[in-house]
Structures are given as structure tokens and as C-alpha cells.
Amino acid sequence: MSLRLASRAQNCNLLLSAGPTSISFRQASATTTKPSHAPPILSYHWDTQPPTSSNLSFAERFFRPPAQLLYSSPTFRSVRPSDVPEVAFLGRSNVGKSSLLNALTEQKICHTSKHPGRTRSMNFFAVGGPDGRGSEGKLAILDCPGYGKGSREEWGGEIVKYLVQRKQLRRAFLLVDALHGFKPQDEEILSLFRRYSVPHQVILSKIDRVLFPKKIKPSVSALEHSDPHFRSFCESLKSKVQPGKVDGPEALGELVACSAEVRLANGKQLGMNNVRWAVLAATGLGAQKRRASPSATVDCSLTNTTDNNLEQSTP
């Protein structure tokens, strides 16, 4: 099936059609040059710096307050004014978007279904707890209806209006199924982002299906063992994320991978804190400030100055 994202505003016309394109994890080249700074497991960076352990811990704490549904909007015209930054999550039907948002907030804020097209409006959620200025959250996350099978043309038109015209939007996150790779629909969305200068980033969902074949039990050691393959896999996708075309600003030069379905023995879900940090970095809520040191000198043999002398702050 196909979806025409036809927006009468801004002359935004986009035809998305399904295709047979897929990218195999096992086919990825192994001749990858490692970045100068080894990225955390399940994130790959070539234009950005990977988050530190303190960044990831801060992101996990930020998302602990219960998320709240602010409202649902079938049209861009009915989207409410807001003073907090927003991020939008998009993807093909059944890419795992609703499951990811439930895992991100650690609560069931989105309905999940095996049948495509369950999300039928733009749903806004308040995240991070009250901002102290009257808003229910420090940021808002938008769950967009999926495109492709089970979708409707009018949904696409309203989403395009939001992406192009919404001033509060800080970044659009495009979910791509790690097992099946970029479909023509996904590449059309990336082209739309570039054409209208929409800040965007790619997230690889369902990474467990790539990293852990049926006979391999998910574990930290298994993740560490698969790290070289994960790097080469991400390297093979760079030309899709940043195709080098001159039609507009490209996606952020990093890939974050995650799974909403698999937990390790420590209870952590794969890559979820990396996704949380990406959201905070996009909105400026992960900004760091240097804490005043009680002494003019620091014993670096006892103190990690990178992590221990920095604290996270939110505006």
C-alpha cells in the first residue's frame, strides 16, 4: 500500500510507496574505521560526540516523572500553542513507534497493536515533570500516525504542515526497522526533511532482531561481542542517513539503536537511555554547566574531571 502526503500548505507534496529494499546486518562491510572516541553500546557517532555515562544517567532520571497525555489533534490547525520544546516521532506502520514511546517513558502511554494504523491522530505527551512555569512537562513528545499500510492520506498532509510550520519543533526522529532497513517511504521522508530544513535524526528500532538471532540470549557480553558488527552495520547505513545530496540539511551524523521488547539481566532496555539523551540533546535540556570546584586544584588520579565536575541542568 502507499500513502500520499499531500499538503495544500507550503506546496508540500510527497508520494510514498512501499518497495522491496532491505539491508542485511550480515552483509555489512567489516572494514570500518572506528571513531576516535568509542561510542556507547548501541549508538554510533561520526559527526557528534557520544554521551557520557553521566549524560545517560541524567537522561534516565529526567524521564522518571510520569508522562501525561496533553491532547490529541487530528489537524495542524487544532494543535495548541506551547512554550516548551517539542520533538516528533515518525515511522512506517508497525515499525515499533508506540512500543518505543512506552519504553521511553516506562509506562503505557500509547496503544500497541499488530494491526497497522492504530495511531490515528497527533498525540502530544508532557515529559519530565512540571517546568515550574505552568506547563505540565519540560518538553512535549509528539506521537505521529504511521505511514504506509493502514494509513490515510489526510494524516500525512496534517503531519507535513506540523513539521514545516511548528516553531516549537526541535527535532523529528525517524524510526527505521533495523532488520528491514530503509524503505523507499523512509527515504522520501528524509528527502522531505531536507527539502524543508526540518532538523532530524534516525533511530534504528527492533535492534534485538539483528543483534540476537534466536539461539543467542541477550546479555551484556553478547552486546560487547557484537559491537564490531554493529559498527560496520551502522557504517553501511551512513549513505542513507547522509546521502550527500544538495537538496537541504542532512540528518544528524549519528545513529541510535534500541529495542522496546528486550531487557538485559540488569533490567535495562536496549539503547533506551541513548534515545532519551538524544531527545534532551535536541531540545537543549541536556545542557551541561561546570560546577564550581571547592579547590583550585584537582587530583586527577582520584577524580574523573569529565564526569564528576559536571552536573546536568535544565533551563
Image (cartoon, rainbow, N blue to C red):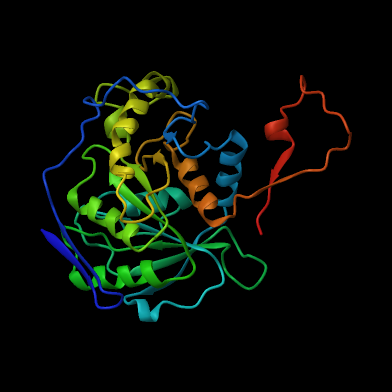
Residue farthest to the bottom?
77
Which residue is found at the position 15% from the left and 42% from the top? Answer: 21
Residue 58 pos. (x, y %):
61, 44
* Image quadrant in which you'd find residue 185: bottom left
Q: Is residue 252 above or below residue 216?
A: below
Residue 278 pos. (x, y %):
49, 47
Which residue is found at the position 50% from the left and 60% from the top? Answer: 67
Which residue is found at the position 42% from the left and 33% from the top? Answer: 42
Residue 57 pos. (x, y %):
59, 40
- In this rendering, does residue 315 appear at all? yes
Which residue is found at the position 58% from the left and 55% from the top? Answer: 284
**Quadrant, the N terminus:** bottom left
Q: Is residue 103 left or right of residue 11?
A: right
Residue farthest to the front?
246
- In this rendering, does residue 93 appear at all? no
Q: Nearer the viewer, residue 226 or 116?
A: 226
**Quadrant, the C terminus:** bottom right
Residue 72 pos. (x, y %):
38, 73
Q: Nearer the viewer, residue 42 or 6?
A: 6
Circle count: 0
* Image quadrant in which you'd find residue 260: top left
Q: Is residue 6 left or right of residue 84?
A: left
